[in-house]
Image (spheres, rainbow, N blue to C red):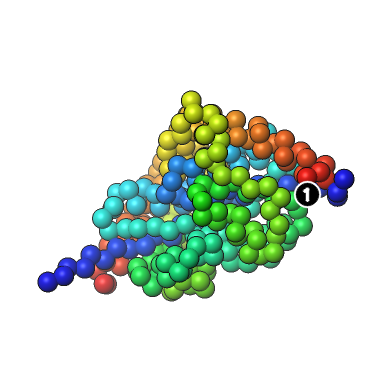
């Protein structure tokens, strides 16, 4: 009997221009590293720059998008170019929920930003659990 | 000599899976924050993926330098997909090949050696930024 292992796709906004984008990348990376057998990622621009395999990402994996601002690039791009995400997370909403201030720098995060990275990674992990339960 | 520009867009790779994506970003941040602040400017690469009008205008009205982290060249292709023309395209690994003493590590963010490599890369790319701002090299 074949046992199919479902992996959850995590699509991060890369947000190079805003501190929340850096927070998004670091939290997604943390979530990916902590759940290596259950998660997979793709670079968002590969929906355009990649091939068929990249464009069918959200059809092959239930997908969680994580966005750093209300433009929601990750959610919109995933839906437009690959497939509807199972869940869409927003960094501003997560920070608000946890009573945390938004980060203020683009790079070299340290202890001051650690709580925010941890909170977002925790919410991603929670979303991964929920998606896996639904599958 | 071509048209002078007040902005030169520097677009790095968005990847969170490979070290050279992080080197590309660190290089772009070094340019924008320290080496050529006010002249070198960034936008979020995913904004081009969703055709955001402001981001599209930025890369179609100003010279663009891309710094990619892998041969898939997402940054370069994303600019071209919205009708922008890339004035100069770099791959971050090239800087390591030229500076083997600076082996970068880290994926989402680079460690100290990667930061040093990014400083070297930014210093080199700054020369190109200056040329493009002056209307040369387009």
Q: Residue at x 26, y 66 (%)?
A: A6
Subunit that carries the residue with mark 1: B
**Which quadrant holds residue B119?**
top right
Residue B133 seen by the camera: no
Q: Is A109 placed above or below A95 here?
A: above
Looking at the picture, does residue B62 appear above or below residue A81?
A: above
Residue B83 in sight here: yes
Taking the image as shown, residue B85 lies to the left or right of residue A121, namely right
Kindly identify the residue that appears in the image at 86 percent across and 49 percent down.
B2
Q: Residues within 10 Å of mark 1 (few under 14, many from 20)?
A: some
Query: Residue B98's x, y, as percent?
Result: 55, 31
- Say whether residue B23 is left or right of residue B66: left
Residue farthest to the top, as pictured = B101
Q: Residue at x 72, y 35 (%)?
A: B127
Q: Which residue is mark 1?
A: B138
Residue A23 horizontal/vertical position (percent) = 47, 48
Locate residue B68, reporting x and y percent. Answer: 56, 48
On screen, residue A11 above or below B91: below
Depth check, front residue: A8 or B20: B20
Across the whole image, how many numbered discs are drawn on residues?
A: 1
- Residue that lies at the very extreme toward the left in this rendered image: A1
Q: Nearer the viewer, residue B7 or B33?
A: B7
Question: x, y (%) of residue A90?
Answer: 47, 60
Q: Secondary structure at mark 1?
A: loop
Residue ID at (48%, 65%): A51
Whether residue B89 sits left or right of residue A39 in the image: it is right
Which image quadrant: the N terminus of chain B?
top right
Q: Is B75 situated left or right of A30 in this image?
A: right
Which image quadrant for residue B51?
bottom right
């Amino acid at each position: 009997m074949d046992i199919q292992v479902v992996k959850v796709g995590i699509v991060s906004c890369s947000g190079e221009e805003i501190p929340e984008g850096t927070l998004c990348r670091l939290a997604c990376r943390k979530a990916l590293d902590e759940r290596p057998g259950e998660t997979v990622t793709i670079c968002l621009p590969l929906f355009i720059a990649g091939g068929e395999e990249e464009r069918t990402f959200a059809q092959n994996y239930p997908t969680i998008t994580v966005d750093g601002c209300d433009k929601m690039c990750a959610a919109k791009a995933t839906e437009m170019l690959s497939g509807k995400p199972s869940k869409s997370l927003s960094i501003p909403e997560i920070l608000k929920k946890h009573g945390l201030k938004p980060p203020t720098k683009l790079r070299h995060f340290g202890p001051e930003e650690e709580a925010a990275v941890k909170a977002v990674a925790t919410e991603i992990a929670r979303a991964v659990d929920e998606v896996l339960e639904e599958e | 000599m071509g048209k002078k520009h007040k902005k030169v867009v520097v677009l790095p790779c968005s990847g969170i899976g490979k070290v050279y994506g992080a080197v590309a970003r660190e290089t772009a941040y070094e340019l924008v924050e320290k080496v050529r602040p006010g002249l070198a400017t960034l936008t979020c690469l995913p904004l081009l993926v969703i055709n955001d009008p402001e981001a599209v205008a930025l890369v179609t009205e100003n010279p663009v330098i891309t710094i990619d982290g892998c041969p898939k060249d997402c940054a370069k292709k994303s600019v071209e997909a919205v009708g922008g023309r890339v004035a100069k395209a770099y791959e971050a690994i090239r800087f390591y090949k030229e500076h083997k003493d600076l082996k970068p590590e880290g994926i989402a963010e680079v460690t100290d050696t990667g930061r040093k490599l990014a400083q070297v890369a930014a210093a080199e790319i700054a020369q190109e930024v200056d040329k493009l701002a002056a209307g040369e090299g387009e």
